[in-house]
Amino acid sequence: MNHFEFFNLPVAYDVDLADLQQRYRKLQQALHPDRHAAGSERDKLMAVQRTAQLNDAYQTLRSPLLRAEHLLALRGVDMQHEQKTLQDPEFLMAQMEWRERVEELDAGDFAGIDAAYKDLAAQTAELQAELESLLAAEDNEEAADTIRKLKFMHKLRRELEALEDI
């Protein structure tokens, strides 16, 4: 399913999130299962399915990472169930350094955690800009590798957030 078509949006990485939200709300009202309460069981089931599709499409397009994956899927690069590992030795070394850095942080070391957040945000922003360029150039394989890198960065951010919660 093409989520961009669902919202009648152009197939592009750059999405106006306010416009997306407005379209989502209109579709949500139109497709809501309560509007089909008097219909047949089949109509009710279809309404529930369409609402689930709507919610899935909205969540996908709202997230830059999921949106990029969806865009690549539309281009024939499916990353959903892949087992491919990143083959970038420089990034793999950086991953190891990040792992060591996070392991050395104590939950009460707010200055260290803040510094890690800032460094992580800077590196994530660089990768995000790289992804946008690669998608625009339709360099799909390199874009897929950049998505893999961004997934690692997002996972690392969740680990830093978990440190704060301790």
Image: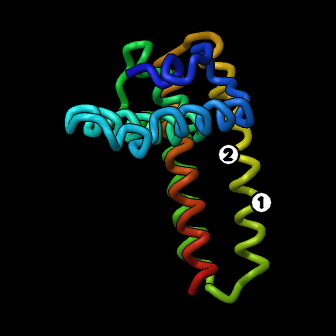
How packed is label 1: few (under 14 Cα within 10 Å), some, or many (20 or more)? Answer: few
Query: Residue 14 placed where, x, y %?
Result: 69, 24
Q: Indicate left or right for 10 with 31 as reference.
A: right
Q: Distance of mark 2 from mark 1, alpha carbons?
A: 10 Å
Q: Residue at x 77, y 60 (%)?
A: 118
Question: Do we see residue 15 in this rendering?
Answer: yes
Q: Which residue lies under the disc numbered 2?
A: 124
How packed is label 2: few (under 14 Cα within 10 Å), some, or many (20 or more)? Answer: some
Q: Amino acid at mark 1?
A: Lys
Query: Residue 53 placed where, x, y %?
Result: 39, 35
Marks 2 and 1 close (CB-CB < 8 Å): no
Q: Which residue lies under the disc numbered 1?
A: 118
Colouring used for the render = rainbow
Q: Indicate left or right for 52 with 146 as reference.
A: left
**Figure check: 161 above or below 4:** below
Judged from this view, the residue extending furthest toward the left is: 41
Q: Residue at x 37, y 38 (%)?
A: 36
Q: Residue at x 52, y 64 (%)?
A: 99
Image quadrant where one finds the N terminus: top left
Q: Nearer the viewer, residue 71 or 32?
A: 32
Question: Do we see residue 89 in this rendering?
Answer: no
**Figure check: 159 above or below 127:** below
Ranked by sequence position, the earlier of labels 2 and 1 is: 1
Label 1 element class? helix
Query: Residue 165 placed where, x, y %?
Result: 59, 82
Q: Nearer the viewer, residue 7 or 160?
A: 7
Image quadrant where one finds the C terminus: bottom right
Judged from this view, the residue extending furthest toward the front is: 38
Q: Amino acid at mark 2?
A: Thr
Q: Nearer the viewer, residue 50 or 82?
A: 50
Query: Residue 136 placed where, x, y %?
Result: 65, 14
**Figure check: 103 above or below 84:** below
